[in-house]
Image (spheres, rainbow, N blue to C red):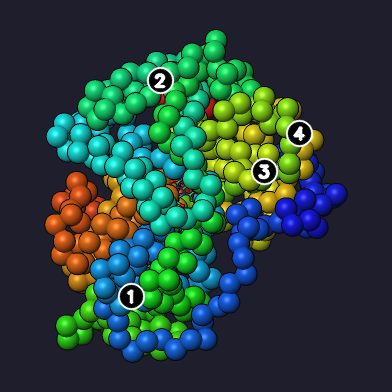
Amino acid sequence: MSASGERPDNPSAVELATGKTRNAHALRYQPYWWDALPERASNSGKNVPRNCDVAIIGSGFTGLSAALTLLRNGRQTVVFERDRAGYGASTRNGGQVGSGNQKFRVKKLIALRGRKKAEDMLREGTRMLDHIADLIAEEKIECQFRRSGRFRAAIRPEHYEAMAADMRDLREIAGVNSFMVPRAEQSSEIGSDVFFGGSILPNDASLHPGLYHAGLMERVEGAGGTILDHTPVTAIVATNGGFKIITSAGECFARNVIIATNGYTDGLVPELGRRIVSIGSAIIATGELPESLFNRLLPNNRVYGNTNRVFYYFRGAPDARRILWGGRIGRLASNKSPSAFGHLARDMLAVFPDLKDVPVTHAWDGLIGYTFDEVPHLGCAASGVHYALGYCGTGVSRATYFGNKIALQVLAKPDGRTSFDDMTFPAFPAHPIAKRAVPTVETWYRFRDAINI
Ligand SMILES: Cc1cc2nc3c(=O)[nH]c(=O)nc-3n(C[C@H](O)[C@H](O)[C@H](O)COP(=O)(O)OP(=O)(O)OC[C@H]3O[C@@H](n4cnc5c(N)ncnc54)[C@H](O)[C@@H]3O)c2cc1C
């Protein structure tokens, strides 16, 4: 196999789509991004420090961003990670960097939260995009960050009209810059005629999540922080003036704790476990495409998505002419079966039939953390632990930003305040049922997408 995962017997996209994958073993069932990461010596054998100022549970963007802010403010910080560092969504995502402002139509957000709150949230979404851009520049993290812009493709003519109205509202209420591309002109944006035009958000961006994560780790360790991988936290016990962090490898006393486990949240802090539903998302990567084909399909090399409830998302790889195609996955493909990824290939071929014979080299999945009000949350739980989580699938910029803000809140700094602070964080009483119902709800949404209700 080459370093890029390509081998002569990789299944083609059409084989994956039709379930006739002869060479299932030739798929690499791990994130494409991991191929670019240098080998990292595990820290798991290291002693757990007896004390620290702040213990952070979870080594994704939230945890590392929080750690960096705390370290820069002189706090001794230890990040605990259950698996390899960055095991969660932070090294598995699509690397599409957005503001989260498209989660709700502006009018719906106003109806739900009132005009003032909606405006504050939308403006803060824009600041999250700027925050990650500034952080990457200031910390000099080489992660192929680029203001690529986003093309959101309308699946139906009425979606185009609704999106145009929403973009006008977004500009009016929060000054967000965007423009519409009608169907007659969309070939300048995408080499497919299945869509009914779309919107462009020119400030949205793309990056290589593996390199971004590796860069953050380097900065955290460079600032004196400790990241302990393969060290699950099994209990957090409130004690005099702080918390006892009980791990598989020993105990640590911390004055403060930040929970940064997002879609990987379990029962460690029950009051958070009841508030997060983990949903699977998956991506496949094609092999290298001929330059002319790649440029015809993605002429401006942006990040892309559509307007369905159960939407798909795609982009070119930042370092090769490959296409990375993602979407929901009902159950995580823990058995690493190609059939779990067939729907991604089918969606991809419906948009780009010319890709039918291209090899598929990688297939992977991960968990996103959903909340019942579809808004991310941060703050201090009744048990005294701090938390930042629930990005509902848009977490590259938001996890980075919330990590920074929750650290500032631990430090009691006024600039830690956000417009998300005073929101009720809804719990679902029958949470285990909600968890099991995820595939059913998804099927229902797919059905509604199909018949447009
Ligand atoms: C396939 C996929 C595609 C996505 N695409 C995009 C995208 O294109 N754009 C975008 O904005 N967002 C995307 N997302 C979402 C985004 O990746 C996440 O919102 C973000 O990475 C969350 O970061 P985090 O640090 O909060 O959590 P994570 O990165 O998920 O990290 C949580 C960590 O906590 C650890 N953990 C859990 N429990 C314990 C414990 N008891 N002890 C120690 N460690 C523990 C886990 O092992 C895990 O590593 C995608 C997600 C997935 C899965």
Where does label 4 land, which residue? 290
Q: In terms of secondary structure, where does tag 4 sit?
A: loop
Q: CA distance from mark 2 to mark 3?
A: 28 Å
Q: Earlier in the sequence, mark 1 or mark 3?
A: 1
Where does label 3 land, which residue? 320
Q: In terms of secondary structure, where does tag 1 sit?
A: strand
> Looking at the picture, does residue 47 appear above or below residue 205?
below
- Residue 118, given in percent of the width and then of the height, sits at 21, 35
- Residue 92, given in percent of the width and then of the height, sits at 54, 54
Q: In terms of secondary structure, where does tag 3 sit?
A: loop
Q: Residue at x 47, y 17 (%)?
A: 181
Q: Quadrant of ligand 1?
A: bottom left
Q: Amino acid at mark 1?
A: Thr
Where does label 2 land, which residue? 179
Q: Amino acid at mark 3?
A: Ala
Q: Amino acid at mark 2?
A: Phe
Q: Please state if 240 lies on the left or on the right of 321 as rendered.
A: left
Q: Is mark 2 within 8 Å of ligand 1?
A: no
Q: Please state if 289 lies on the left or on the right of 105 as rendered.
A: right
> Looking at the picture, does residue 49 appear above or below residue 130?
below
Where does label 1 land, which residue? 77
Judged from this view, the residue extending furthest toward the right is: 8
Q: Amino acid at mark 4?
A: Pro
Front position in the image: 219 or 431: 219
Q: Quadrant of residue 271?
A: bottom left
